[in-house]
Image (spheres, grey):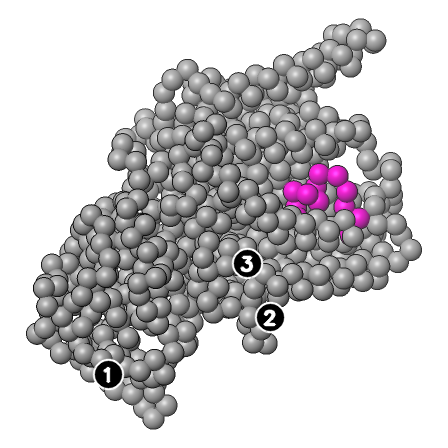
Amino acid sequence: MSLLVPWLHCTGYALELLALMFIPGLAMLRVLGYRGLLPVAAAPPVTFAVVAVLGQMYAWIGLGYSLGSLSVGLVVCLALTWCASRLVLGRLPAPLPRELSQRRRGTALLSFFVALGVGVLIALPILRQWDPELPAQQIDSVFHYNLAWTITQTGDASLLSGASWSFSMRAIPAYYPLVWHAIVAAIAGPAHVVAVTNTLVSLTPIVWALGVAALAHEAFPTSRWAPAVASLTMALLPAYPVYMLAYRQLWPNALGYAVLPAMLALLCRAMRLLSVTGVAGRRRATIALGVFAVALLGAIATYPSAVFSVVLTGLPLLYGIVKATVAFVSRRLGSGRTAVLVAAAGAVVLLLVVAMLVLEPGVIARLGRDGYAGLTNLPRRLCALLTLWPLGGAGLGYKMALSLQLVLIVSGLVVTVRRRQWRWITWAWLLPMILLTASYLPLGPLTAATGLWYNDPYRIIPLVMPAISLLAAASVEWLLSVMAVRASDWRVRPVQEATAAACVVLLLAGSIGADSSRGKAAPSAYAAETNALVRTLTVDEVAMIRSLRDRTDPNLMVLGDPAAGAAYVEVLAGLLSVFPHMTFRSMDWDALYLAQHFSEINEDPKVCELVRHYRIGYYYADDAGTVAGMDVPERAPGLYGVDTSSGFELVASARTASVWRITACGDLAPASARDPWGLSTPYEPLYGPDGAVNTFDENGELVPES
């Protein structure tokens, strides 16, 4: 427990984050008639949709995004939801009729606490190995920290422009899904982004586990134990969420996956209501479809590939919804008119898909990416496909978890294939498994389709996991039915309860056994013995960067290689970095010139011209860090070996890292000459990709070379 002490001061952040993610969406869903576990689990994607819409609206009307403005907007949206529910429902009570609720009392509460415990269990390796005040180190993590900090400076949480300052020295309008960053910025303010972000990382497994429990609730509406079994089954598989959160640190992507089970649960509810409109009412079914659409918007705003993930894993449910809708329309309009409507709707969907492919070239580019699929090292590929854990593992605990996982999958497939009402679960497992197979083995067009998930098996494995949780629940449900048949009438319930409890205990033991595998996926880059992919900072260096707040002018920029730690000056010291991202942007010509030639500051006049124009007041010097797949010194030779004996004044240092005030270029441009938070600043960049002086028209727009 002593290892968790550093997190105690983050308890307030955790409560605020949970409140922001869950309370707005939960309130809206309860107004619309949702009760039990589903509105709790589905609250985050609904909240995310509202946050995304408000962030965009505030940018359009010029209102700054902050916790205060967000809170006001959330209250207004809740009021509008209440008005809409009254308008749609009329005199119909919001909650479902009692005959549609077949669960025993206390099931939702039991499921909630089991899921909560599972979420904490999954997050334990992060809590044990991470210090909440130390920034994580990965290619993407510094970008996510800096983007949240940028929102606190600009007040812009728009998906269309909020990330414009986070890729390069020059702010260029850019789209990015920044719901993750908007949530962090609202709670953290400019000074606590690291601690709040790390806290949100540790809370994401709770969102995932609650969604899995809600999905099992909807898939097995009469079961008491299915949600608990499904939640615990997810703790057997270490590939998600810990690997994606802690090892790869793809945080918005991970949050987009975390809401996937809740999305499927909403689909289950919608399909169920559409199939019993005579009891539930058409209006409730309409609301269910509307809620799913809003939640899907929230998932897409969190990470755009969520739309492909939901469609693929939810295809059997979507088919059921379409089938029920067509049957309903056909009874009222006749088969002929219905066929015309279906054809028209199909044409519209096809046009939308074509438009997306044409208007978003990034989708086509992904489909053409080179992937991992191949036939080399085939046994290892097949093993990874079978275990859903490419990193492998050892020890009795891991082997127990793996054995349970395989037994539950196989038995669940046998059970769900034989029962018509559960057969959709088989399809929900099979479809993403085919895609996962195509990510390991060359399967032509299917392998190309994995490009929508960056051809990355680790981004496809989470699509399979919700179905695995339902396969496990189906296995236990079948076992309970067998025990009921064999037990005498008066002993049926005690025997079933004892059997279910034994299954839960066995799953809990397996989940604890899988902790070693999760721990392997949650290393701290500050510990020398770990297998971290990126190392750019030390603990002393972090303290040195934080000290810059009291030693530097916040209106001046810092130049240094982000792979040497320089990019962290934004989130840790409140200073703008020339390179806020670990990777360089090809269109950032002036910054790239400095990366190549800054060490020639005393010989090349262009260097000083750029330093003066962009008000670069500090140079960050350090040895090159370690970044997997990157030759750090080779890509930015001008940022290493700089002679600081003249033209520089030492500001702070820690071991090999140091920050210097640049005096070699004389006085910088006045602060009024250039707004560092301006978008598409005229007369920039000063130089082209070849170092030649650029030409501009009378409006300051770059004139392309003929």
- From what the image shows, is residue 696 above or below residue 86? below
Q: Secondary structure at mark 3?
A: helix
Q: Is residue 393 visible?
A: yes
- Earlier residue among tags 2 and 1: 2
- Earlier residue among tags 1 and 3: 3
Nearer the observer: mark 2 or 1; the answer is 2
Which portion, as a residue range, is magenta? 32-44
What residue would you read off at disc 3?
186
Nearer the observer: mark 1 or 3; the answer is 3
> Is 172 one of the magenta-colored residues?
no
Residue at horizontal 48%, vertical 64%? 152
Q: Quadrant of residue 268?
A: top right
> Is 37 one of the magenta-colored residues?
yes
What number is the disc on residue 694?
Answer: 1
Mark 1: few, some, or many residues within 10 Å (few <14, many ≥20)?
some
Taking the image as shown, residue 46 lies to the left or right of residue 524, namely right
Q: Amino acid at mark 1?
A: Asn
